[in-house]
Structures are given as structure tokens and as C-alpha cells.
Amino acid sequence: MSPPAANAVRDRLRIAIQKSGRLGDPSRALLTACGLDWRESRDRLFCYGETLPVDLLLVRDDDIPGLLADGVCDLGIVGRNVLAEQAAERAQAGAPAVAAELRALGFGGCRLDIAVPEDWDWQGPEQLRGCRIASSYPQLLRRWLAGEGIDAEVVMLSGSVEIAPRLGQADAVCDLVSSGATLAANQLKPVLTLLRSEAVLAGPVRPFTDARAALMQTLLRRMDGVMRLRHSRLLLFQAERGAMARLIELLPDAEPPTVLQVDGADTLALQALCHGAMTWQRLEDLRHAGARGLMVLPVERTLA
Ligand SMILES: Nc1ncnc2c1ncn2[C@@H]1O[C@H](COP(=O)(O)OP(=O)(O)OP(=O)(O)O)[C@@H](O)[C@H]1O
Ligand SMILES: O=P(O)(O)OC[C@H]1O[C@H](OP(=O)(O)OP(=O)(O)O)[C@H](O)[C@@H]1O
Ligand SMILES: [Mg+2]
């Protein structure tokens, strides 16, 4: 691995992803679906790209915006919450933005919420005036408070934020929520959402001018193809000619289907790419309307 160099001209692309944790596996799965694979290094912190000159850096998620800022990596997969917090920190310090959200990736969904003790009679943000609010996202919280014109104290905690009210360290919290189980376990209730987050592909604000430009376009094109088909399935079935129009009505999420004649005149076979969830209920509805030999096939990739 060559030494880090901001603004260096490079002919390989470097992508940082979370080494472990919530985003590690889905990030790797997405890149694998885009046709990338790597020769693992022994410590597995740097993986050398084999099929394309695209290398992986495996890091703590909080380090990804800084690695992008320093030019150590070119792209990163990170929660919008982390990207936005560090962007707010740079803005606060008067530093220019260095990383932009290029794509939302559809996994790692969560919210950055303000939560208060369950026994509070919540009337609105004004109630937070003069309160102590514990958070791992001090910049996003301060920016929101300033926007609302609320003077409150921000208590920075790097983890286990939800316990702060019970320990007397804070009156309310501002933390990530997905199922809500952690809030409930700590007798807290969510009252406001500051940010809706998911994993995003972060990259440079200005386009590359070297070989990385074409590599990034290739990767983005493949990623768009993978994401477009993420919930898509190929549906196959046969039906009598007279039932086909009604069956097609049941597929509003399908691309224009291919319909072929199977034998003689009356049996037709349909093949359609459907973009909505192909649930058991939908299959049963199709069967009820005359479809036979129903098959649902995964779709791996597409190239427009
Ligand atoms: N319930 C959740 N709690 C926290 N983060 C979530 C949740 N659901 C999704 N996420 C997303 O997953 C990201 C990574 O969360 P994780 O808990 O793995 O981070 P971490 O403990 O900071 O990991 P690391 O060791 O890499 O620093 C979060 O920044 C957020 O974008
Ligand atoms: O709404 P829920 O599904 O309960 O998830 C939310 C919790 O998950 C995260 O914590 P994590 O488990 O990563 O531990 P942490 O305290 O180390 O951040 C987050 O900080 C919340 O505490
Ligand atoms: Mg982290």
C-alpha cells in the first residue's frame, strides 16, 4: 500500500468501509455484487482489488470522513449520521466541505432522535430550553438547537447515551434509534427526529481528473444497476389466453411483460420483471386468477 497522499494522482480507487459493526457486511456484499473482489492482506485492513483496480480499507466508521478529507481514500460507505456530524464540525470550524453524499444505499436505516423521559408531558421543543441533552452527535444537535433558537447544554457522550438521564447526567438524549428498544428499556420516548439516516456512498466534492474518474463511473453505474434490482424478481407463469389480461392487471409494478404462445392457441407463458415485493400473498392472488407453474427467480444484474 502506498503512503497516504492528499491530492495525489492515482490509478487505483480506494474505498473505505467499516471493518466490522452494522455496516461492514452489507457494504462488502454491495461491492461484491458490483463485481469487485480482493486479495486479502494478512491483517485484512487493506484488501487489494483483483478484478478491478479498486482497493478496500477496513476501518472504524467514524474515521471514514477524515480519511476522505485527507485524501487517504477516495470513496467511503458510512452512515449519513456520521457524515453529517463531521461535515457540521468542519463547517463550524470554517473548513470547506470535502465529502459529498453520492448515493443512498438502502441499508443501515436509523433516525437521530431527541428522546425524553416517558413521564414528561411533551409539549414541543420549547420544553428543552435550559435542559442538559446527552448525545454522541453534538454538532448536529447544536445546529438544530440554534435553528430553533433554544439555549440548552449539550453533554457529549460517545456511547450508552440512553442511560444518562437515569444517572443524572442529562435531562434528555439525542441518539440513534432503529427499533426503539433501547429507548424503551431506559424509560425514554422519542419526541423529535433531527435526521433520517442510512448508509451512503460518500465521495469527493470535485470530480477526479485522473484514472479514478473512469473507475468511479464504472462503479457507480454497477451500483445503480444492483440497487435498481435489489427488490426485483423475474416472474414466470403460464395461463389460459382468456385469463392473461386480468393477470397482467395484477402486475402494476412489472416492466412490459413478454408473452409467448406455448401450445396450440390457448396456453400462454408470461415472463415479467417485477419491481415490487413478490410475496406469497401475491402469488396466491395470481394463482387464484388463473396463473399456473408460478416461478419467482432472483435477478442478479442489469446493464442499461
Ligand atoms: N440501531 C442502530 N444504532 C446505531 N447505529 C445504527 C443503528 N442502525 C443503523 N445504524 C447505522 O450503523 C452505523 C454503524 O453503527 P455501529 O454500531 O456498527 O458503529 P460503531 O459502534 O461506531 O462501529 P465502529 O467500531 O466501526 O466505530 C451507524 O453510524 C448508523 O449509521
Ligand atoms: O433503537 P434500537 O434498535 O434499540 O437501537 C438504538 C441503539 O443502538 C445503538 O447503540 P449500540 O448498540 O451500537 O451501542 P452503543 O451504545 O455502543 O452505541 C444506538 O446508539 C442506540 O443506543
Ligand atoms: Mg464508530
Image (tube, rainbow, N blue to C red):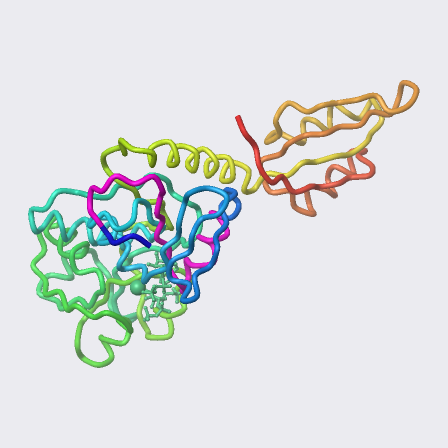
Instruction: Please tell me in which quarter of the rendered image ligand 3 is found.
Output: bottom left
Query: Looking at the image, which residue is at 26% across and 51% down?
Result: 72
Is residue 28 within the magenta segment?
yes
Residue 289: image location, x then y, percent? 78, 34
Along the horizontal axis of the image, is 301 left or right of 23?
right
Which quarter of the figure is the N terminus placed in?
bottom left
| Above or below 105: residue 21 | below
Query: Looking at the image, which residue is at 86% across and 24% down?
Result: 262
Is residue 22 within the magenta segment?
yes
Residue 278, picture quadrant: top right
| Above or below 109: residue 253 | above
Residue 52: image location, x then y, percent? 46, 42
**Residue nearer the viewer, 30 or 130:** 30
Along the horizontal axis of the image, is 181 left or right of 83?
right
Query: Looking at the image, which residue is at 16% across and 56% down?
Result: 139
**Residue nearer the viewer, 59 or 38:** 38
Outermost residue on the bottom side: it is 167
Outermost residue on the top side: it is 265
Outermost residue on the front side: it is 2
Residue stretch rendered in magenta on the structure: 5-31
Residue 60: image location, x then y, percent? 32, 62
**Residue nearer the viewer, 153 or 104:** 104
How many numbered marks, from 0 up? 0
Along the horizontal axis of the image, is 78 left or right of 303?
left
**Residue nearer the viewer, 178 or 67:** 67
| Above or below 205: residue 153 | below
| Above or below 71: residue 45 | below
Residue 182, picture quadrant: bottom left
Residue 223: image location, x then y, percent? 46, 39
